[in-house]
Amino acid sequence: MSLLEKINNKRIPSHIAIIMDGNGRWAKERGLNRAHGHQEGVVAVRKIVEAAIQANVKFLTIYAFSTENWNRPDDEVDALMELMVHAIVKETPDLIKQGVRLLTIGDYERLPNKTKTALKECITQTEEGSSITLILALSYSSKWEITQAVKKMMGDIQNNQLKSEDLNEELLSDYLSTKGIPDPDLLIRTGGEKRISNFLLWQLAYAELYFTDTYWPDFREEHLYKAICNFQCRERRFGKTSEQIEKEQRDKLNNL
Ligand code: IPE
Ligand code: IPE
Ligand code: MG
């Protein structure tokens, strides 16, 4: 039985977020430069998008470049931006074929013009995609995103478009760049580190966390399916007790 067959189709995480880490170490262990690791990382992205579609995952958010990554050496940042343009242009026809809808979150304005143009094109060309929404977190950090949301909210209060007493969690969510996208059910981080690195801090409030030592360039469909199987073994209680959850499930089955 393949791992894909072992997955329970009734409990697929509808949104998976991935911190794709370990490209540099993957390259270093092979005596290659870091850019080579990032190139191999693109291959893994392609495979994982395909695998996620196969498993019927509806939203996949991948952390490709953080606000903090702007502090890396200039040559690495330049190589990453070049690679991004190249990969987006090259992959667009396949994304369309597979029914992928591309979205981005992050500080778009900081990106080089070439990257902005390539992204805009790809977003327009894939807007009809309905098999999966792929959200590229680029020049993204959660603290940046929340700060932007607060600024916008304060502006709307000043312009009388919003009353401060109307503020609630749902409304705050709508000011984030992930508006309309359900919160991730499962967060995967590759590369062995066990931290969130300023990623989706608000949206991950109740996500299941899965850490693996596998470096991102080695991450393939079997790794994704293993993470999904692991997710399916967990009980998501959202603050309730196990007994309450079991009763809810029984009642749901009885009402079918
Ligand atoms: C993740 O791999 C990709 C980006 C952050 C752009 P790293 O480049 O962080 O790889 P390691 O962690 O140094 O191995
Ligand atoms: C997190 O990886 C950001 C991305 C995967 C894009 P890093 O490798 O930059 O994370 P830290 O700084 O080591 O936590
Ligand atoms: Mg890293």
Image (tube, rainbow, N blue to C red):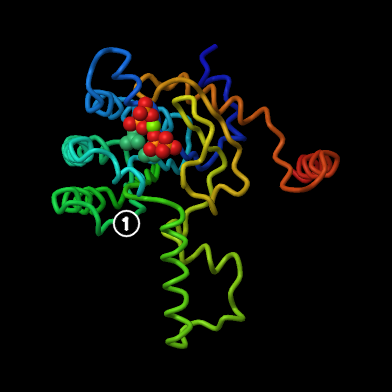
In this orientation, which residue lies closer to the viewer: 75 or 65?
A: 75
Residue at 51% from the left image edge and 21% from the top image edge: 4
Instruction: Tell me, yes or no, if residue 61 can be seen here.
Output: yes
**Quadrant (top left, top right, bottom left, bottom right) of the N terminus:** top right
**Can residue 48 be seen from the camera position used here?**
no
Vertical placement of residue 105 versus 149, above or below: above
Location of residue 83 in the rendering, given as x and y in whole percent from the top left corner: 19, 35
Residue in the picture at 48% in, 25% down = 224
Residue 47 image position (x, y, % from top left): 34, 26
Taking 129 as reference, is 33 left or right? left
Q: Position of residue 110 (x, y in %)?
A: 25, 56
7 vs 120: above or below: above
* On screen, residue 3 above or below 102: above
Mark 1: secondary structure: loop
Q: Nearer the viewer, residue 238 or 150?
A: 150
The picture quadrant for ligand 1 comes to top left
Residue under numbered circle 1:
107
Q: Which of the image's four quarters has the C terminus?
A: top right
Q: Is residue 64 left or right of residue 61?
A: left
Q: Is residue 234 above or below residue 168?
A: above
Find the residue positioned furthest to the left.
114
- Which residue is at 53% across, 45% downward? 184
Choose top left, top right, bottom left or bottom right for residue 230.
Answer: top right
Looking at numbered disc 1 in the image, what kind of residue is underneath it? Asp
Q: Position of residue 137 (x, y in %)?
A: 36, 46
